[in-house]
């Protein structure tokens, strides 16, 4: 087995850890801005969504194997803004009393946060298990 292939599991899991960590940061930012009615552009805050891209290992013996994941970028959600009747709000429409609120649903964001946290834990478990397997292999080879 090639020395580089020996550590590919570490690279794959580490890339998953980094990607899920970024995803949790974005979700936390979405939750922090869930009530911002005026962002820098003057419109309500629009939630961010993380785009993942798989990284392929073109050196793999069987063609293209998976070599991890990376954050491709962030996109703004295209979901419509929420509207609430709040006539006393400074950003309310003067005629209807409706306020446009961010398209952030706290329940959905919390579910996404739990999912990202579990994926992070799963990648960490893979790293720990693989490390233990490698240590056992070294002990047996003595």
Image (tube, helix red, strand yellow):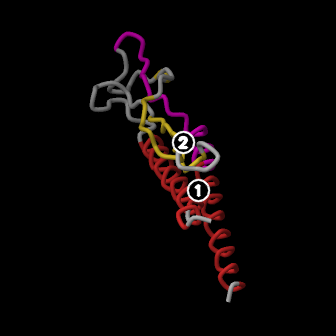
Q: Which residues are magenta?
A: 94-115
Front: mark 2 or 1: 2
Mark seen at residue 120: 1
Judged left or right of residue 91, residue 127 is: right
Task: Give the image quarter of residue 10.
Answer: bottom right
Q: Nearer the viewer, residue 15 or 61?
A: 61
* Residue 90 x, y percent position in the rendering: 32, 26
- SS category of the residue bearing label 2: strand
Residue 105 in magenta stretch? yes
> In this image, 111 relative to 14: left or right?
right
Q: Nearer the viewer, residue 46 or 74?
A: 74
Looking at the image, which residue is at 43% across and 18% down? Answer: 98
Residue 88 visible in the shown view: yes
Are the residues at dot 2 and dot 1 in contact (C-beta closer than 8 Å)?
no
Spot the residue most to the top: 95
Q: Is residue 28 above or below residue 72?
A: below
**Disc number for residue 8:** none
For the C terminus, the quadrant is bottom right
Q: Secondary structure at mark 1?
A: helix
**Where is residue 42 shown, x and y percent of the image?**
29, 25
Residue annotated with mark 2: 54
Q: Point out residue 131 in the picture as x, y percentages from the top left corner.
A: 62, 73
Residue drawn where x is 56% and y is 55% of the image: 12
Toward which corner of the image does residue 8 lie, by quadrant? Answer: bottom right
> Looking at the image, which is closer to me, 55 or 32?
55
Specify few, some or many for label 2: CA neighbours under 10 Å numbering under 14, 14-19, or 20 or more: some
């Amino acid at each position: 087995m090639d020395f580089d292939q020996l550590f590919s599991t570490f690279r794959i899991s580490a890339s998953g850890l980094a990607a899920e960590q970024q995803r949790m940061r974005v979700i936390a930012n979405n939750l922090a801005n869930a009530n911002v009615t005026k962002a820098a552009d003057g419109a309500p805050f629009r939630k961010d969504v993380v785009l993942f891209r798989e990284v392929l290992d073109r050196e793999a013996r069987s063609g293209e194997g998976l070599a991890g994941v990376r954050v491709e970028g962030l996109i703004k959600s295209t979901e419509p803004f929420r509207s609430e009747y709040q006539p006393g709000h400074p950003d309310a429409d003067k005629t209807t009393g409706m306020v446009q609120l961010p398209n952030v649903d706290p329940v959905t964001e919390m579910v996404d946060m739990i999912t990202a946290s579990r994926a992070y834990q799963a990648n960490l478990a893979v790293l720990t298990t693989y490390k233990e397997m490698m240590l056992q292999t070294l002990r047996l080879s003595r």
